[in-house]
Every structure is written in C-alpha cells, then in structure tokens.
Image (cartoon, rainbow, N blue to C red):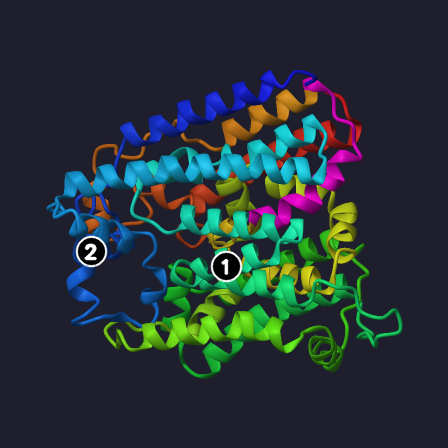
C-alpha cells in the first residue's frame, strides 16, 4: 500500500466494471428507463413543454435535476430528443459524475489524512457496490448518483470551512433529493460546539433507540389492526401479515439494535437548547443566505406544480417502521446486499465510530440520527447520498487499526464479490415477471437488492452470506490478520 499506483489500479478496475454496467444489460421496462426512470426520461424529453404547461407534481418536481438540463441543451441546439440521443447524453452525464466523485473522494481522503489502507477500503465501500457497478448502468434515468455527488461536494466544502461554496452546491439538492440539502444545512447551523453546561436529555441514546424503534414498529402494526387497516399492512410488507412472525421479528430487531447501540452513551441536548443555540450562533446574514434562495426556489417551483401524483409523507414514515418487520433482521441483510462490507465495518467498529460522530458537533449528531432513521428502512438506497458523512467517522475508526496490505486486499475482494454485479438479471421470463408484478420468482434477481421486495428465499440466502462475510470481516478487522 506504499505505492500510489494502487489507487490507479483501483480507479482502473472501477472504470472497467462501471463501463461494463453500461454496455451490458438494460431494464426491459419503459424502453430501458425502468420504473421511476420513466418520469425522469419524460423530464429529459419534454421539460421545455411540460414545465410551462401542466407542470410537475409537488413531490417529483424536486427530482428533476439533471434531466431538465439535458432537455434545455437539446432545445437550445435544436436537437431532436430521440431515445438514443437521450440515452447517450445520460452516459456522458454518468461518466462525468463518476469523475467528479473520484476527484472529491480523494480530496476528502487527503483532508482527513486517512492511511492508504483506510482510503482503499473506503474507496471500495463507496464505488465497489451494487449501485455503482450494476444499477447505474442498468437504470440510467435515476437521480441517486447525482444526489450522491451533490452531497459529497457540498459536504467536502463544509469540512474545509468553505461555507459559501458548500451552501451554493447544496441548493442543487432541492431539485434532486431535498433531504441532502437539509442535512447540509443542519451541519452548517449546528457546526459549533455548545457550552459544556448546556442542558442534555437524561436518556442513554443507544439503549433508547434500541427500545423505541421496535416498539414504534410493532405499535404501528397494532394501530393498523385496531383500525382494520390490515390490507395496508400487507401492501407495505408485500406479504400477508402474521402477528407471531411480526412480534418475533420486532424482538429480533430490538436485540440486534441493543447489541450494536449499547455502547453509544451520548446524550442529546434538550430541544430548547438547540433553539437557543441556533439563535445565538446564527447571525441574520447567515440565516438570510440560506432562507432567501430557499424561499425563492420553492415559490417558483410551487407555481409550476400540479396534484397529479400523490405522495404521503406519513405513509413513507409508516413504511420505515414496518419494513424491518417483514423478515428477521431484513434491514441489515438488505444493507449488506446493497452496500457490501460497509454495514459490517460500521457494526464491528461501532464503539469508535459512534464516538467519532458524536464528538464532532451537535449538528453531526442530529444529522446522524436522521440518517440512522432512514437506514432502519430495509430499502438501503435511501441512505446512498449520505455515505460521505458515514465514511469520515468510519475512516477515523479504521485508521486506528493499522490494517496490513494483505488484509486490505482481502476486504476489497470481499466487497467486490458482495456487489454481485456479475450476476445477470435479464434471464428468461424476467420481462414478463415485471409486467405481471411478480416480484418473487425470476424478478428477484433485481428486487432482492431492495429490501421490501426481498423474497423469503433471497433473505435467507443473503442472511447466510451476511453471517459468513461478517465472521470473515470481523476476523480481519479485530484480529488484524487472516
């Protein structure tokens, strides 16, 4: 690991596999656009017309970047927006995007002065996962990759103390994935430490979360039964609900969280403390720099919205509580399926990892709590853009281990293997299964990557893989040898 050439090799491997994902399979739905991708394709195709006439619904109008830019480019140069040309433009955007990610990843690594072994492992966690090596090329009309870049760039500038650049970049998130924008602002406004005597809650954070989340999950189940809303429960789980199974899964989920979080003894400040410190630390100029553009952008977008598509934030929160109960420990299993060794490293190093988080700033603690909430959903992609905020404390924890070259290489090999990018998806019967909404047969080759749609068989298989990978990663990280 003493040679910088190792990173040249890692980048070469990344581009090799990344390119393969674009010249390989395409999702056989909506002419290769996929499910959600159909909307983004239409933005790239019809933005100049739709935005000024019908507009977009008040949820997806915040998901139009960078697709509207493609349309404006085509319109400006009078290019007919054919599918082939739009597809080619997305290829260019994705490869440009990955170059930007690489540049700012290495900037972030140098800023935090990670060891070369740590940088290599974090590189693998960021780039050698299912999303980058398979999903990006399989479904090119998606916001996820671009939202990840916006957060990475904005987060980097925030870490450098270049607040104006960080905030300016963060505004792009409003048009891509608004929660990344709000997270950056949370880190910005609560970036300074509070007074040592600032009141705190008398609650052990780790144990409170381990107890509260399963109770809220099973409480949501109980409420749906009392309201005779069992069909809603079944639809969110994608299987018929079973009270004994749900109770068992809630207990398993609680035990898992307790084992992981019991050493997290951080205590959050009282709500009034955050309000008081926000007022004390935030000047009028500081607030105006964020509030005025935010209000202007939202008012402008509101003028071009319609009620075509219905989105319920309460239903989204409800599904986050319910989905971890579908199968025992489906959330950590789904995260391993999507991100590889990243969740294993966080779990194994959680004592040091959590200290690195909560000792940084009150804003970092609050933002991590919000990210943790989204991470409890078994659909792992919801935390994809926030990975840089996880990598910084994880990198600090990894730096204390002094991993050998051999151990680092083995971890990278495990990461690439867990990405399962090499498994073909478009086998016989797959397109028909998508058309018939048959998630649990051959379509599992695609849907196993998104926890809620996992079949029992996929969950068992990936559960076994998670156990074996967990043992191996534990031996490498804790023993520091193989």
Q: Secondary structure at mark 2?
A: helix
In the image, which disc is placed on residue 104?
none
**Mark 2 or 1, which is nearer the eye?**
1
On the question of residue 227 being in view, the answer is yes
Question: Could you say where residue 324 lies in the image, as x and y percent from the top left?
Answer: 53, 58
Start-end of magenta stretch:
387-406
Magenta span contains residue 196:
no
The residue that mark 1 highlights is 168
Q: Is residue 371 above or below residue 111?
A: below
Report the magenta stretch's main SS.
helix
On the question of residue 329 being in view, the answer is no
Magenta span contains residue 403:
yes
Identify which residue is drawn at 55% across, 55% down: 165
Q: Is residue 150 left or right of residue 365?
A: left
Q: Is residue 311 left or right of residue 351?
A: left
Q: Is residue 155 left or right of residue 233?
A: right
Q: Secondary structure at mark 1?
A: helix
Distance between mark 2 and mark 1 Cα atoms: 27 Å
Q: Is residue 212 above or below residue 349?
A: below
The residue that mark 2 highlights is 42
Residue 27 or residue 40, whichever sits in front = 40
**Which quadrant holds the C terminus?**
top right
Q: Is residue 321 above or below residue 118?
A: below
């Amino acid at each position: 690991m003493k040679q910088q050439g190792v990173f040249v090799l890692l980048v070469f491997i990344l581009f090799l596999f990344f390119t393969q994902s674009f010249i390989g399979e395409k999702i056989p739905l909506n002419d290769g656009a996929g499910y959600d991708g159909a909307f983004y394709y239409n933005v790239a195709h019809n933005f100049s017309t739709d935005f000024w006439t019908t507009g977009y619904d008040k949820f997806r109008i915040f998901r139009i970047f960078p697709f509207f830019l493609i349309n404006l480019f085509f319109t400006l140069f009078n290019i007919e927006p054919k599918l082939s040309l739009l597809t080619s433009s997305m290829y260019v955007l994705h490869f440009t995007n990955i170059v930007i990610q690489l540049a700012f990843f290495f900037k972030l690594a140098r800023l935090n002065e990670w060891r070369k072994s740590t940088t290599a492992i974090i590189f693998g966690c960021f780039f050698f996962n299912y999303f980058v090596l398979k999903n990006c090329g399989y479904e090119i009309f998606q916001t996820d990759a671009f939202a990840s870049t916006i957060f990475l760039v904005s987060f980097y500038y925030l870490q450098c103390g270049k607040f104006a650049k960080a905030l300016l970049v963060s505004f792009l998130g409003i048009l891509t994935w608004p929660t990344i924008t709000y997270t950056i602002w949370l880190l910005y406004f609560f970036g300074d430490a509070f007074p040592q005597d600032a009141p705190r809650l008398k609650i052990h954070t780790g144990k409170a979360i381990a107890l509260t989340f399963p109770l809220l999950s099973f409480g949501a189940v109980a409420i749906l039964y009392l309201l005779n809303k069992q069909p809603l429960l079944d639809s969110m789980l994608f299987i018929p609900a079973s009270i004994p199974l749900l109770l068992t899964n809630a207990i398993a989920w609680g035990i898992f969280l307790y084992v992981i979080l019991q050493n997290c003894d951080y205590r959050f400040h009282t709500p009034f403390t955050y309000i008081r410190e926000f007022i004390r630390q935030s000047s009028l100029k500081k607030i105006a720099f964020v509030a005025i553009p935010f209000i202007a952008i939202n008012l402008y977008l509101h003028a071009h919205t319609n009620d075509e598509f219905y989105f319920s934030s309460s239903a989204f929160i409800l599904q986050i509580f319910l989905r971890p109960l579908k199968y025992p420990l489906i959330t950590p299993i789904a995260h391993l399926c999507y991100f590889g060794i990243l969740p294993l490293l966080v779990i194994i190093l959680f004592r040091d990892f959590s200290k690195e988080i909560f000792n940084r700033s009150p804003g970092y603690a609050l933002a991590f709590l919000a990210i943790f909430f989204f991470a409890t959903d078994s659909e792992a992609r919801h935390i994809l853009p926030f990975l840089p905020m996880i990598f910084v404390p994880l990198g600090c924890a990894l730096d204390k281990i002094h991993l050998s070259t051999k151990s680092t290489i083995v971890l990278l090999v495990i990461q690439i293997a867990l990405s399962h990018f090499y498994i073909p998806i478009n086998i016989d019967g797959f397109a028909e299964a998508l058309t018939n909404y048959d998630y649990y047969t051959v379509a599992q080759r695609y849907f196993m990557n998104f926890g809620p749609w996992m079949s029992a068989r996929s969950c068992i298989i990936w559960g076994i893989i998670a156990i074996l990978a967990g043992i191996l990663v534990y031996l490498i990280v804790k023993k520091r040898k193989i």
